[in-house]
Image (tube, rainbow, N blue to C red):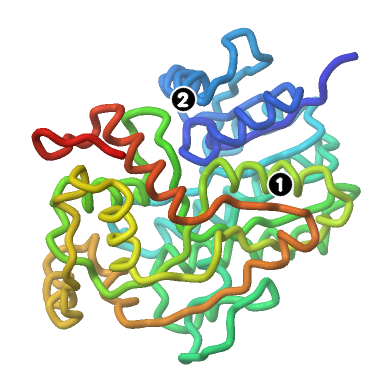
């Protein structure tokens, strides 16, 4: 019997390669999209590093979120869609629409192609950014019933994720046909690296380990392992209870970056000797952000406390993510093992 095919967008991305690997291990055929032919080799190497055999039923299509070309062909014959691709620049764009438009229009483009091809279930990767931002301070944990207020000053990335997800639900309400939609809202995605191209979240761990970050900004976030986030996508793809639902992907509540740094110190021992132990005053972070665009999001969120409730995915789908500390330590060890971070002389990770 021919295996059903899963379409995974953004196939060379950090989370997408884990989704590809999980789907192949479960017996599906996978068609992954890449923006340019040169990215196919990078994606194949990452999937191989995740332990998938070379002869696995994996193929690639070239398709860009900003253009219609290629999407109908990519979706043809697929039973499921995991739309993981989304623009995430290293620094804030000069114009907000440079990020918002490709995120929103790209999501609609992919969903329409999937619907027209007869895909049964689409799973879209959104973000906790579409849930917990732009609100007054509160001790109440955010849940999947909450939406970010895009009328507040939330920044281009947060606005792009929120508007793209809202557009996806609106499309499904108006013209979704027989296809059902599920949305995953991950927090900070970490986990072992599969190659030298580092996601922005992994760059944060690298900066802690190599001493680039001398002090920790007073920001908080929750952690989810890329392996567990991919597992949640696969659960949501086939479980009837997931249709029409959103699921926060997190391993526990948000934590201060300082606490995560101490986790590396305690878990790695001398190999984490460069990890900072002191906080960066918020006034200093905001001053630096005036001259360093990549720090602006951190400066805007410094001192803000957001709590979240991660129970829905556990209760409804039986999802069981690993502890955040294990994820951070696995991330750090993989960076060291692959030579992407050089530990202090005479040390090795525990």
Say which of 347 and 12 sits in front: 347
- Compared with residue 41, is residue 264 higher up or lower down, i.e. above or below? below
In this rendering, position of residue 241 left or right of residue 99: right
* Residue furthest to the left: 345
**Pointer 2 local density, CA inside 10 Å: few below 14, some 14–19, many at least 20:** many
Of the numbered discs in the image, which one, if any, rests on residue 42?
A: none
Above or below, 35 against 29 in this view is below
* Residue at screen point 89% across, 51% down: 240
x, y percent for residue 338: 30, 27
Expressed as whole percent of the image width and height from the top left, the position of residue 50 reads 52, 26
Give me the residue at 67% from left, 48% from top.
232
Q: What number of labels is visible?
A: 2
Secondary structure, mark 1, is helix
Task: Give the residue pinned by disc 1.
Answer: 111
- The residue at 62%/73% (across/down) is 309
Q: Earlier in the sequence, mark 2 or mark 1?
A: 2
In this rendering, would 48 be left or right of 245? left
Quadrant of residue 332 within the rendered picture: top left
Measure how far apart labels 2 and 1 are at the Cα level. Answer: 26 Å
Where is residue 164 shown, x and y percent of the image?
Answer: 59, 60
Q: Position of residue 307 (x, y in %)?
A: 52, 78
Quadrant containing the C terminus in the rendered view: top left
Q: Residue furthest top?
A: 55
For the point 47% across and 37% down, the residue is 13
Pointer 2 residue: 46
SS for callout 2: helix
Foreground residue among 98 and 158: 158
Between 115 and 197, the one lying in front of the other is 197
Above or below for 23 versus 59? below
Tell me whether the residue at label 2 lies in contact with that at label 1, contact meaning CB atoms closer than 8 angstroms. no
């Amino acid at each position: 019997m021919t295996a059903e095919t899963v379409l995974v967008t953004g196939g060379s991305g950090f989370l997408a390669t884990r989704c590809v690997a999980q789907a192949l291990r479960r017996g599906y055929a996978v068609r992954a999209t890449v923006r340019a032919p040169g990215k196919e080799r990078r994606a194949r190497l990452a999937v191989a590093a995740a332990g998938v055999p070379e002869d696995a039923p994996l193929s690639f299509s070239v398709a860009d979120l900003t253009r219609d070309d290629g999407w109908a062909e990519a979706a043809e014959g697929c039973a499921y869609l995991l739309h993981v691709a989304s623009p995430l620049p290293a620094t804030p764009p000069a114009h907000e629409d440079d990020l918002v438009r490709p995120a929103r229009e790209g999501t609609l483009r992919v969903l329409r192609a999937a619907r027209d091809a007869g895909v049964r279930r689409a799973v879209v990767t959104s973000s906790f950014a579409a849930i917990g931002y732009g609100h007054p301070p509160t001790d109440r944990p955010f849940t999947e019933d909450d939406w970010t207020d895009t009328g507040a000053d939330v920044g281009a990335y947060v606005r792009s994720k929120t508007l793209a997800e809202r557009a996806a639900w609106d499309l499904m309400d108006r013209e979704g046909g027989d296809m059902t939609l599920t949305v995953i809202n991950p927090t900070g995605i970490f986990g072992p690296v599969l190659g030298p191209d580092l996601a922005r979240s992994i760059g944060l761990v690298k900066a802690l380990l190599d001493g680039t970050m001398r002090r920790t900004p007073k920001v908080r976030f929750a952690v989810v392992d890329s392996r567990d986030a991919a597992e949640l996508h696969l659960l949501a793809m086939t479980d009837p209870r997931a249709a029409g639902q959103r699921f926060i992907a997190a391993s526990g509540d948000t934590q201060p970056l300082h606490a995560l740094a101490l986790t590396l110190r305690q878990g790695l021992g001398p190999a984490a000797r460069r990890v900072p132990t002191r906080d960066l005053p918020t006034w200093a972070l905001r001053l630096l952000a005036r001259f360093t665009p990549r720090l602006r999001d951190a400066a805007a969120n410094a001192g803000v406390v957001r709590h979240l409730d991660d129970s829905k995915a556990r209760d409804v789908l039986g999802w069981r993510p690993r502890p955040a500390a294990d994820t951070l330590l696995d991330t750090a060890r993989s960076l060291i093992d692959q030579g992407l971070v050089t530990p202090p002389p005479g040390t090795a990770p525990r």
